[in-house]
Amino acid sequence: MPATSPTTPRTLTLTQVLVFGAAIVSLSMGIRHGFGLWLQPITMERGWTRETFAFAMAVQNLAWGLMGPLAGGLADRLGATRVLLVGAVLYAAGLATMAAASSGASFLGGAGILVGMAQAGTTYAVVYGVIARNVAPDKRSWAMGMTAAAGSLGQFLMVPVEFWLIAGFGWQNALFILACAALAIAPLGLGLREPPRAAHIGVQQSVGSALKEAFRNRSFLLLTAGYFVCGFQVVFIGVHMPSYLKDNGLQPGVATTALALIGLFNVVGTYGAGVLGQRVPKHRILSSIYFLRAAVIATFILLPLSPASVYVFSAVMGVLWLSTVPPTNAIVAGIFGARYMGMLSGFVFLSHQVGSFMGVWLGGRLYDTTGSYQVVWWLAVALGVFAGLVNLPVRETAIVRPAAPVAA
């Protein structure tokens, strides 16, 4: 077999990247998507306020965001497999700690810090870095959309499973069972073990130079600002909507169906966004998504609440749910290249998670203060308009760097 040259390093096959990447994202994102189902059983049994639970979820998202650049950077440097292994162990430990926690502080440590760190090492920053390094640029947006769609399918499938586990085994045992399931991410990570030099494609550039280049780039900053809004909206809805519906007299099954519908229609949205990103400027896709979210949320809170309105809202929001992920990451890869894709997408995702922290924490805080979620709903509408506007000036042109000198 001919030797692989430094300029044409061996890569993983497209099928391998998609199958294992999709399975990992599906399991990791699917488990967390149903966390809102635990809010009421945990707070009622422990005698905690909703803010206690919400603050732990908020810290989880913040820890996820803060660790994202580190996890992505380590995956860029060492390969994704090692990062996924550590992430799987942290995920299982965090879920087990959630189940055993008897105080708000210990619950915060498990649900907030451990699970948040685990998600940084088992989701998009790591998996999308592998895609960027191993999939041709003309297929990246599609591949990212395909992987995100698989993750969405996991969310759709896991919500009824988690509801059934809580009903059949109790909320504590359900968390222990999910902890065992999270460990399956480790063997799946072996499927993304990259050949030598696959993580070092492209112009040789230092980490400091890459960060300086990114944070001086106007489009990168605008993209990052818009992603804050994505996190605010989806995590507020995902965590607080089940309680919002129950407060308004709807049966718990409505919330379960709503979350499942979000996951199901998210499959359509994420795949569609990935395919559309091959044909339409990706920043326009992002602006449209944010404007549509604002309109859909405003319509939902203005209309009378009923199971039918909840299901329609969930289906439409599902299409828009994580459809921001493929175009956002594809823009980052397109502008800066694949070399530091995991790290740079991790920084963009940090903004998303700061938004997630604000959305889930403000939801609990303002509910405990005012007895209503109304202020946060309208804040989500206003932020959607803001994100739609800031993505309009984003430019997707790749940065041209001077070629490195070649030794004689």
Image (spheres, rainbow, N blue to C red):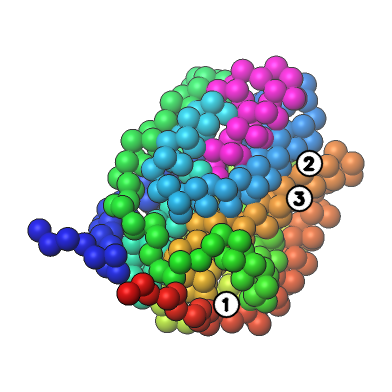
Q: Where is residue 186 in the image (x, y as percent from the top left)?
A: 38, 35
Q: Is mark 1 on a helix, strand or loop?
A: helix
Q: Is residue 65 above or below residue 137?
A: above
Q: What element carries label 2?
A: helix
Q: Position of residue 33 (x, y in %)?
A: 55, 43
In the foreground, 241 or 226: 226
71 lies left or right of 39? left
Label 2 to label 1, Cα distance in Å?
A: 32 Å
Q: Is residue 103 above or below residue 218?
A: above
Q: How crowded is mark 3: few (under 14 residues within 10 Å), some or many (20 or more)?
A: many
Identity of the residue drawn at 65% across and 54% down:
350
Can you identify the residue that label 1 sits on? 283
Which segment is the magenta one? 95-120
Among the 4 quarters of the image, the one containing residue 67: top right
Q: How crowded is mark 2: few (under 14 residues within 10 Å), some or many (20 or more)?
A: many
Q: Which amino acid does label 1 sit on?
A: His
Compare marks 1 and 3 and give the one earlier in the sequence.
1
Q: Where is residue 119 in the image (x, y as percent from the top left)?
A: 54, 42
Can you identify the residue that label 2 sits on? 364
Identity of the residue drawn at 77% across and 32% down:
52
The residue most toward the front is 408
Identity of the residue drawn at 50% across and 48% down:
74
Label 1 to label 3, Cα distance in Å?
A: 24 Å
Labels 1 and 3 touching (C-beta < 8 A): no
Q: How crowded is mark 1: few (under 14 residues within 10 Å), some or many (20 or more)?
A: many
